Image (cartoon, grey):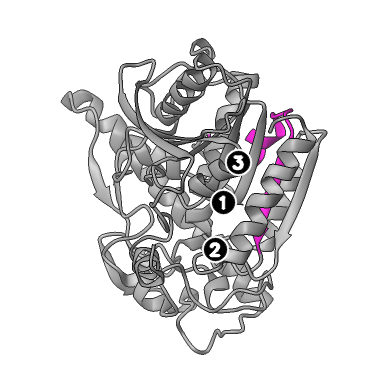
Amino acid sequence: MRPSAVAAQTALSAVRQETGLPEGITRNLVPLTAKDGAALDGVLYTSDRGCDTALVFMHPHVSFHHHYALIPLAARGCALLGLNSRFAGNDAALIMEQVVLDLAAGVLHLRQQGYEHVVLVGNSGGGALAAFYQAQAEHPTITAPPAGRGPDLTRAALPPADAVIMLNAHRGRAQVLTAWLDPAVIDESVPLARDPDLDMFEERWGPPYSPEFVRRYREGQQARNRRITRWAQERASTLVTSNVRDEAFLVHRTAADLRFLDLTLDASERKVGTYRGADVWAANAASTGLARFCTLSSWISQWGLDTTDAAAEPSLAACSVPALFIQGTADQGIFPSDTRALFEASGAMDKEIYWVRRGTHYFAGQPDLQGQVFDHITEWLTKRGMR
C-alpha cells in the first residue's frame, strides 16, 4: 500500500492502520453465536505456514476486525481472531457479563478448530475484559450482572485461555471513567454550570496542580461517579412498578483527567492532551465521548465504580496463567502507575512487564515500535511453548 494511503487510514482510525494482506496470509469471516443466542462476527487471520496457537483480540465495543496487530502477528506465525462483541459500535446499553459470553464464543470456536493454545490479548479497554473473562473462567463467581437480568457466569462453562497479554490496557471501564470525570459539574442536566473550586481549567489551580488540589479533585471525581450510580440505582428501582426494564440518560464532561494537562503527574514521555488531540477543554466539552450515552443497567454494570464486576485488578488477582504487560511510555490515557498497578495485582507466577519507550496508545505512525512489540510477543509465546 502506498504511504499516503496508509497515512489516510491512520488518520481515519488508529485501530485499523493497514488492511492489505501480504502473500501467505488469509482472512476469513467467522460468524458465531453466544451461549444466550446473541449473533457475533469475528475475522480470523491465518498463515499458510500453520500454527497451533491462536490469539484473540476483543474490545467491549470497539471493532477489532482489522486491528493493527492482526496481520503482522499472523505473518509471524500465529492465528489471530479479531472478535466483535454484540455491542460493537454502540456501548450505550453494554452489559459486561454479556460481553464475557461473546468472548467465550470466540475461545470455544478456536478450541473446536483444534488450536492447542489460546491467548487473550487485552488491548486498551479490552484489557479489563480479558482479565475479567479469564478470572471467571478459572474461578466463576458471578451469578448475575449487578443490575440483574443477565447471564449466570457460574453456569456458563467458560473455556479458559492459556495466557493473557495486556497491551496498553486500562484498569477497567469504571476506573478510567472516574479518572477522567470532570468533578466541577454541579448539575448533570446543566453541564455548563461549574464549581470553580474543582475546575481544572481555572488558571489559579494550575497546571501544575498542587497535591492538595489533586487530592480534592480525585475525591470529587469519585463522588460524582457515586452520585450518578446512586441515582441510577434509585431510578431503576422506581421503574419496576412501571413495567419498564431500562431507561437512557446522558453523562457529560468525561475527559478531564489532570494528567492530560500536567505532565509532572504520573510523569511519562506523553504529550499534553487526550487521544482527541492537545485541546483538553474541547475534548471534555465534546458532544461525544466516554460514557456519553448510557442506560441505567449499563451504567451499573460497566461504569459504576462500586458496582461493576469488571475491574481489572481484582480480576487479574484471580488469574493464574502466564501474563505479559506491554505499555508504551507516551500513552496519553494510560499512565505508568496504571500499568504497575495491573502488574502488581496479577496473581500469575509467570508475569513480565515490558515498557516501550516513546510508544503511543496504538503506536500509530511508529512502525519500528510496532515491530518491537510484535517481536516481543512472539518471543514471549515461543519461550512458553505457544508459538
Work out whether 163 lies above or below 358.
above
Which type of secondary structure does the marked residue at label 1 adopt?
Answer: loop
Quadrant placement of the N terminus = bottom left
Residue type for callout 1: His
Q: Is residue 252 left or right of residue 326?
A: left
Q: Earlier in the sequence, mark 1 or mark 2?
A: 1
Give coordinates of residue 118: x percent, y percent.
60, 27
**Residue sitting at the far right:** 349
Q: Which residue is mark 3?
A: 312
Task: Determine contact: label 3, label 1, CB under 8 Å.
Answer: yes
Give coordinates of residue 142: x percent, y percent.
53, 21
- Residues packed near mark 2 inside 10 Å, few (<14), some (14 to 19) or many (20 plus): many
Quadrant placement of the C terminus = top right
Q: Which residue is mark 2?
A: 363
Q: Which residue is mark 1?
A: 170
Task: Determine contact: label 1, label 2, CB under 8 Å.
Answer: no
Q: Give the distance between the C-alpha atoms of the residues marked 2 and 3, in whole angstroms.
A: 22 Å
Q: Is residue 301 magenta?
A: no
Q: Earlier in the sequence, mark 3 or mark 1?
A: 1
The answer to which of 355 and 320 lies nearer the viewer is 355
**Span colored in magenta:** 310-328
**Residue sitting at the far front:** 23
Which of the 4 image quadrants contains residue 258? Answer: bottom right
Q: Give the distance between the C-alpha atoms of the residues marked 1 and 2, in whole angstroms.
A: 16 Å
Q: Is residue 36 left or right of residue 134?
A: left
